[in-house]
Image (cartoon, helix red, strand yellow):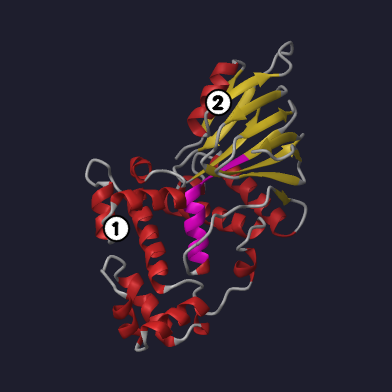
Amino acid sequence: MPVVLHATGDVDAARAFLSRHYYSNFVDVLSPWHPWQTRFDVTPSHAVTVGDLRFGTDVRIQFGELGAYHVNLPLTGSLVWRQGGHAPLRATPTTAAVFQPVGDACLEKWDGDCRLLAVKIDRGMLEDELARLLDGPVTSPLTLAPTIDLTRGRGASWLGLVRHMAADAAQPHGLMHHPMIGAGLREALVAGLLSAADHPYRERLEHPRPASAAPAAIRRVVEAMRAQPGKPFTAADLAATAGVSVRSLQQGFQRHVGMPPMAYLRHLRLERVHEDLRQGDPAIHSVTGIAYRYGFLHMGRFAAEYRARYGVPPRDTLRG
């Protein structure tokens, strides 16, 4: 999608633009006696939004829960921020601010000389990418560390990637605007954040378990479930596929996958439902139809599980 350019000295216009492309907000100008003008260059998409933002005056911006992962990377100046009940932190050109999908967020003081890159990432996309990199479901909420060191290592490399993408998006024929290449760049940005930020799965990403570590029997069952996730498997069916007893299958999955086989199947089905909802057309598809396709017959329980995993009701994902 082409970059959206916006410049204004009107606080309501600035607030409306940020609401449209990022989150609902309330802006309080801290130095109203100085003339000022915002400059927002934003490349929006459903999954990843990258913006080059500057306000031109000191402001305070309050948000509710973001519902997405978000990173602010100051290029100049500084930003004092907080989320939930945590103490305020400062983001600078050496330290990025990382926001979670849950917890009210506030930019306590966005300095007038602070120009920043603002990266918004769909919660489902980040968690699905983590599951893909781990080659298995994400079984607990993904909480990223609140800061990233931008001076060295993968933090510095990720900053370079974001800067490149923002600069490329500003070009009318940049690669970010190509349907296939742009999608690949956005996926690289998401995977790069998982590598640059600290989180509970970081060690597993740094030292992945080789596929050969799981016995052939376990791999056969995983492949069968991935090939037909909507099939009404029973524990006995899966044990027969593995060629072992139900008890041995349970123990093998717990040892090599980290959960029972039926729990793995349920996580896999949720992932497939989520992907189909993201790609679906609400004029043609329904949440119930997609859920039934993958074996979810009790819609109340399904909706509760989906919301616990992805932070939104399934109908919101289908509506985009």
Residue 110 location, quadrant? top right
* Residue in front for this viewpoint, 191 or 105: 105
- Is 300 situated left or right of 251 in this image? left
Is residue 175 positioned above or below 135 on the image?
A: above
* Magenta segment boundaries in residue numbering: 118-133
Query: Which residue is rendered at x = 44% and y = 43% of the image?
Result: 46
The amino acid pointed to by label 1 is: Phe
Quadrant where the image shows the N terminus: top left
- Other residues around mark 1 within 10 Å, as few (<14) / some (14–19) / many (≥20): many
Q: Position of residue 87 (x, y in %)?
A: 74, 38
Magenta-drawn stretch contains 127: yes
Q: Amino acid at mark 2?
A: His
Answer above or below: position of 151 versus 136.
above
Residue annotated with mark 2: 6
Which is more N-terminal, label 1 or label 2? Answer: 2
Of 215 and 115, the residue lying toward us: 215
Which element carries disc 1, helix, strand or loop? Answer: loop
Considering the whole magenta stretch, tell me its main secondary structure: helix
- Disc 1: which residue: 296
**Gap between marks 2 and 1 measured at Cα:** 45 Å
- Marks 2 and 1 close (CB-CB < 8 Å): no
Task: Indicate yes or no whether the magenta region holds residue 297.
Answer: no
In x, y percent, where is residue 88? 74, 37
How many C-alpha atoms fall within 10 Å of the one at disc 2: few (<14), some, or many (≥20)? Answer: some
Image height check: is 286 above or below 20?
A: below
Q: Is residue 167 left or right of residue 92?
A: left
Q: Quadrant of the C terminus?
A: top left
